[in-house]
Amino acid sequence: MVAIIEKRQLRDFDWLTGVLAVAIVGFGVWQIYNAQPTESYWSKQILGLFIALAAMLVVAASDYRRIVDAAPVFYALGIVLLVLVLIPGLGVKINGQRAWLAVPLVGRFQPSEFVKIPVVLMLARYFGNKKGGPLRFREMFVGGVILAIPLGLIMLEPDAGQALTYFPLLAVVLFLSAVKIRYVILAMVAMMIFVPTSYVLGVKYGVIKNYQRERVEAILDPENADPRGYGYHTHQSMITVGKGGLTGIKGNQQISQSVLKFLPEPHTDFIFAVTAENTGFVGCISLLLAYAILLSRLVMGAREAPDKVGMLVIMAIAGGMTFQIFMNVGMVLGFLPVIGVPLPLMSAGLSAVLSTFIAIGFVISVKMRRFVN
């Protein structure tokens, strides 16, 4: 499955995409240090970067088509890991979520981060081998089942934020696989009805927890949200963002919201707020520009893909990353409720960094083989 990179393929290696990803992680390490200077999160992130780079190179050197052919094996393995997470004694529970597995000599890792990749491969394998013409309902149903199995297991952890990041993977693949417009309209209408109805019924019957309801209310009615209670996360995040001004805190302002422990989870969920505080509007725009260039490189790779499977793999990855950036930044700025979606390549977390670089490895693998029959 893994092959030595030929000289011609080495010339086609997408160095810019790799360098951009490394630069964003490096910028993130700086912000993680600013957020938690007395902790070891930043040094662990550097170690994770080297491991992630090695994994990216291995995947890039591999023929993505052979890996896609083996997608059912990886998908089944991912499902097994998600089941193991739910078993008391095996799954590690943190902040009310049993979402991690502890491995000797390796430490904790989050299977739900890695399972996104086999889900993408399974969807690309199924829809990429489909003949021409619009999708039929049966085909969309199969795609929904592929997504629903890991999604249901993740919701049992429960990790609604992580589960939410899976939906764009299917949405992008269906859109690019010639889904009929009437199905798109039907899905939009169904979502407009289903989301508010589910929320109301979830609150009424206790499926949605009080803290989840309060975080939604903090966005819907920010003026009446208790800044010391359920509106605390959003309130502190917006204060932190505003404190940065144009170019970030300076001089005697070096004691930041995150260092003073006012901002919760500054090295993970609210790393964009820390970025705003330390580098200001200029730093945030620069970061978003780097993301825009990275995503444009991914889309360019999809356009140059030698087959539909490769195109779907890249676009699903790009769509998932775009959605996570949108959700995290919206959460930090107070436009969306706090649901625990990390910022790709920036937030501390070895599982997220490693899975993202593996995904980028697939993108590079497809681009390297764009001239191969």
Image (cartoon, rainbow, N blue to C red):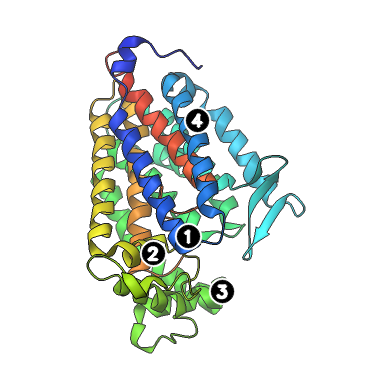
Q: Nearer the viewer, mark 4 or mark 3?
A: 4
- Whether residues under marks 2 and 1 lie with C-beta atoms below 8 angstroms apart, the answer is yes
At mark 4, the secondary structure is: helix
Q: Quadrant of residue 347?
A: bottom left
Could you give the CA–CA distance between mark 2 and mark 1, rounded to whole angstroms? 8 Å
At mark 2, the secondary structure is: helix
Q: Which mark is residue 274?
A: 2
Residue 147 sits above or below residue 246 on the image? above
Q: Is residue 253 left or right of residue 162?
A: left
Going from N to C along the chain, the mark reached first, 3 or 1, is: 3
At label 3, counting other C-alpha atoms closer than 10 Å, the crowd grade (few under 14, some 14-19, many 20 or more) is few
Task: State the residue at coordinates (23%, 50%).
Answer: 289
Task: State the residue at coordinates (68%, 52%).
Answer: 86
Going from N to C along the chain, the mark reached first, 2 or 1, is: 1
- Whether residues under marks 3 and 1 lie with C-beta atoms below 8 angstroms apart, the answer is no
Going from N to C along the chain, the mark reached first, 4 or 1, is: 4
